[in-house]
Image (cartoon, rainbow, N blue to C red):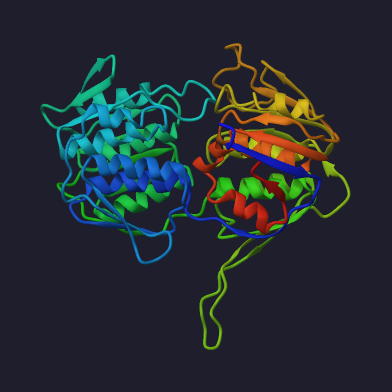
Amino acid sequence: MPEDVLVVHGGTPLHGQIRVRGAKNLVSKAMVAALLGDEPSRLYDVPRIRDVEVVRGLLGLHGVKVTDGVEDGELVLDPANVERASTDEINVHAGSSRIPILFCGPLLHRLGHAFIPDLGGCHIGPRPIDFHIQALREFGAVVDKTPEGMHLTAPAGLHGTKFELPYPSVGATEQVLLTAVLANGVTELRNAAVEPEIIDLICVLQKMGAIITVHTDRVIEIEGVPRLGGYTHRPIPDRIEAASWAAAALATRGEIEVLGAQQVDMMTFLNVFRSIGGEYKVTDTLPPRAGSPGTEGGIRFWHPGGELRAVALETDVHPGFMTDWQQPLVVALTQARGLSIVHETVYEQRLGYTEALNKMGATIQVYRDCLGGTPCRFGRRNFKHSAVIAGPSKLHAADLVIPDLRAGFSHLIAALAAEGTSRVYGVDLINRGYEDFESKLSALGAHVERP
């Protein structure tokens, strides 16, 4: 669309302060969890992003009343009148999000039926839902595939099971958690994902009355309970957005303070950021005292001057380097002296955005080989999933088309770092995961405008 364009006048370092809210990858799942309760839930610090609106719409279709609370970013979710939605209504959301798959367990518990439309999301690899469907069948669900999607029923109810994931998938782990908490008996999940957002979802479910134990070696045990109540929860901050702004500070040779960012969930990123040559300072939140309103903590990121250093980097499941961090950071690596190596082991098609960076003057070569020692799911499946970045490169303006959420923010960072005026098309896709990013850019002194 003509209006879905951002004109970026690059070459100006970003300086200033912005704030991140609750993690996109937790907030939407916590909203789904409200379906499991028989009392209202209250969620704080919810970002105004498109994914939240999609989940809000899906919940509304199923009879969950979602209203804004008194506090900015507060949602109240009342599941008192859960009802079955028509497939036509659900299909309105088909292609806009991958969240519908996570409604299955809660809806099977509440209604005995669930429907999955065609799923969307970012085009970074197939991300099949096989793990989800297999897990649901283990719980006792019956899956009927139709041209419009999949219909699920549970004629004998859902029961606990023992299940091992072939790969520690975040989505499949969420599926098991949201299904097992009300299933009859005990569920043992092996090779589970243990990302901070997973642990925070467990905290949400525990507040509702669930009994969940996180053992060593990626084993999670869930003891099913007969009922769950509501929750009141303030989610962990969005570590992906925080790292994206950190990369923007480094690429533009600027300084950005990210209020709300937490060190504990970003330790791996912070180590790499410092190895490259970036600097940061962590500040803690101070509570109000007599005569003082208190201060919100965060992390201040900046380019200290001089040259950045090349690094070898491999993405991995938590506690490794997060796959969503590599795309913004690669833009900064185009400014580092030497050869940087990035081995992407999580998503097989996540390096396509480098073509646009090369168009802007970067020197990035992608390979099918595994350029690293971390176990990789697709090293011999003909996917270009390793990159070598030669730098430093002088970036120049270009017209860019955003292919997916994280690549989109990387393109935006590149346009901000480049000399000249770029036009970034499809920029509204960034709203899926970055709240009010244009206002934040203005607050940081960026020169951007809608044509």
Left or right placement of residue 356 versus residue 319 in this view: right
Picture layout, residue 371 above or below residue 323: above
Q: Position of residue 196 (x, y in %)?
A: 47, 47
Q: Position of residue 255 (x, y in %)?
A: 74, 57
Q: In which image quadrant can residue 130 be found?
A: top left
Q: Position of residue 412 (x, y in %)?
A: 67, 40
Left or right placement of residue 134 versus residue 405 in this view: left
Residue at point 82%, 34% (across, down): 396
Q: Residue furthest left?
A: 156
Picture layout, residue 405 above or below residue 65: above
Picture layout, residue 4 above or below residue 240: above
- Quadrant for the N terminus in the image: top right
Figure disc tally: 0
Q: Position of residue 411 (x, y in %)?
A: 68, 35
Q: Is residue 203 or residue 431 the one in the foreground? A: 431
- Quadrant for the C terminus in the image: top right
Picture layout, residue 255 above or below residue 408: below
Q: Is residue 11 or residue 245 the one in the foreground? A: 11
Q: Residue furthest right?
A: 306
Residue at point 74%, 29% (across, down): 357
Residue at point 52%, 88% (across, down): 290
Residue at point 20%, 42% (across, down): 182
Q: Is residue 198 visible?
A: no
